[in-house]
C-alpha cells in the first residue's frame, strides 16, 4: 500500500512517450520508473507483483509488432521480458497482466484469448503460457471481444473479466484450472474494469452509461430557435 502505479501519455497519443510512474497514496511526489511503448488505454494497466517490488506492463522493442509483458523494477527501472512473441506474430500480442494474490500465476490476454503462466518462488515465469479461455466468440465478427479488464478472486482460484462487443460487455468468471465460462448474471451489460477486494467480499466495477434522448425546439419561419430545448422522449436507452 505504499505506492500507486499509473501510466501517463500525451494526446494525441505518442506511444514512445508514455511514462510509468508511482506516487504515494497520501502525501508525496510522483516518480518516473520507466518509459514504455504502449498506448494508454485498454490492456495497458500495470500489475503489481505480490512483493510490491515490480510492475508487469505491456511493452515492445520498436514502434511496430506485437506487445510482450515485461517486469519492471520500481527501484531502478530495470526490466526483464516475461513473454515472447515473434515480430511477425499476428494481432496486438500480450496485454492485461494480472498476478494472482498468492503469487503463483500470471494471467494475461493474448489476442482475445486468456492465458496463464506459472510463477516460481522468485516470482519468475516457469514453463510456457497455456490457454485458459477464448473470448473471441463473445463479440460481433471483426470487433474486439475484450477482456475489458481482468481481476483475480481473493483466493486465486478464479478470474473475473468483461467480454463482448464494446460498449456492451458483460462480466464473466472462469476457474484458473479451466472449464466453462460463467456469466455474473446479476449485472447488466456495459460493465467493465472489475476489481476484487483483498478480503474477497466486494467487487468494484465501472458501468458505461450513455443516454441519447429526443428533444424538441420551436423555430420560426427562418428556422431560428424561439424557445429553449425541452425533452420530448426520454428513456434509459438510445432513442
Image (cartoon, grey):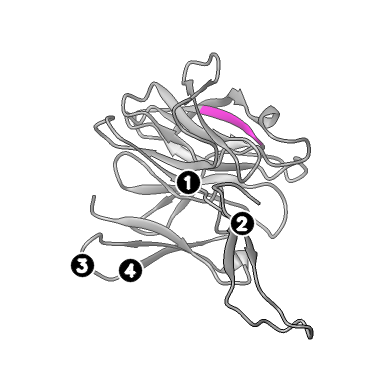
Q: How busy is the neighbourhood of tag 2: few (under 14 within 10 Å), some, or many (20 plus)?
A: few
Q: Residue at x 55, y 20 (%)?
A: 181
Residue 93's disc is none
Left or right, 13 with respect to 106, comes to right
Q: Residue at x 63, y 71 (%)?
A: 12
Which x, y percent locates residue 220?
Answer: 73, 82
Residue 27's disc is 3
- Does dot 4 land on a helix, a strand or a loop? loop
Q: Is residue 114 magenta?
A: yes
Which region is colored magenta?
112-116
For the residues labelled 4 and 1, the Cα–Cα distance comes to 29 Å
Which x, y percent locates residue 171?
Answer: 50, 32
Q: How busy is the neighbourhood of tag 4: few (under 14 within 10 Å), some, or many (20 plus)?
A: some
For the residues labelled 1 and 3, the Cα–Cα distance comes to 30 Å
Q: How busy is the neighbourhood of tag 1: few (under 14 within 10 Å), some, or many (20 plus)?
A: some
Question: In this orientation, does residue 38 appear?
Answer: no
Q: Is residue 87 magenta?
A: no
Residue occupied by mark 4: 30
- Does dot 1 land on a helix, a strand or a loop? strand
Question: Taking 213 as reference, is 28 above or below it?
Answer: below
Question: Taking 101 as reference, is 4 above or below it?
Answer: below
Question: Taking 47 as reference, is 183 above or below it?
Answer: above
Q: Nearer the viewer, mark 1 or mark 2?
A: 2
Q: How busy is the neighbourhood of tag 3: few (under 14 within 10 Å), some, or many (20 plus)?
A: few
Residue occupied by mark 1: 207
For the residues labelled 2 and 4, the Cα–Cα distance comes to 39 Å
Amino acid at each position: 500500500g505504499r505506492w500507486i502505479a499509473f501510466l501517463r501519455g500525451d494526446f494525441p497519443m505518442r506511444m514512445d512517450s508514455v511514462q510509468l510512474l508511482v506516487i504515494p497514496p497520501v502525501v508525496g511526489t510522483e516518480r518516473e520508473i520507466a518509459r514504455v511503448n504502449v498506448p494508454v488505454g485498454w490492456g495497458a494497466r500495470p500489475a503489481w507483483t505480490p512483493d510490491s517490488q515490480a510492475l508487469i506492463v505491456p511493452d515492445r522493442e520498436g514502434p511496430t509488432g506485437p506487445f510482450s509483458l515485461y517486469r519492471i523494477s520500481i527501484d531502478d527501472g530495470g526490466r526483464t521480458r516475461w513473454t515472447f512473441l515473434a515480430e511477425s506474430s499476428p494481432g496486438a500480442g500480450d496485454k492485461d497482466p494480472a498476478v494472482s494474490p498468492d503469487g503463483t500465476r500470471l494471467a494475461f490476454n493474448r489476442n482475445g484469448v486468456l492465458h496463464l503462466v506459472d510463477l516460481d518462488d522468485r516470482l519468475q515465469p516457469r514453463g510456457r503460457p497455456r490457454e485458459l479461455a477464448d473470448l473471441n466468440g463473445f463479440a460481433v465478427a471483426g470487433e474486439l471481444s475484450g477482456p475489458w479488464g481482468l481481476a483475480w478472486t481473493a483466493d486465486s482460484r478464479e478470474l473475473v473479466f468483461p467480454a463482448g462487443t464494446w460498449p456492451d460487455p458483460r462480466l464473466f468468471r472462469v476457474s484458473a484450472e479451466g472449464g466453462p465460462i460463467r456469466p455474473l448474471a446479476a449485472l447488466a451489460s456495459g460493465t467493465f474494469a472489475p476489481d476484487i477486494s483483498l478480503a474477497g467480499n466486494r467487487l468494484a466495477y465501472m458501468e458505461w452509461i450513455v443516454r441519447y434522448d429526443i428533444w424538441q425546439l420551436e423555430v420560426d419561419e427562418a428556422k431560428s430557435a424561439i424557445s429553449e430545448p425541452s425533452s420530448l422522449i426520454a428513456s434509459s436507452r438510445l432513442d
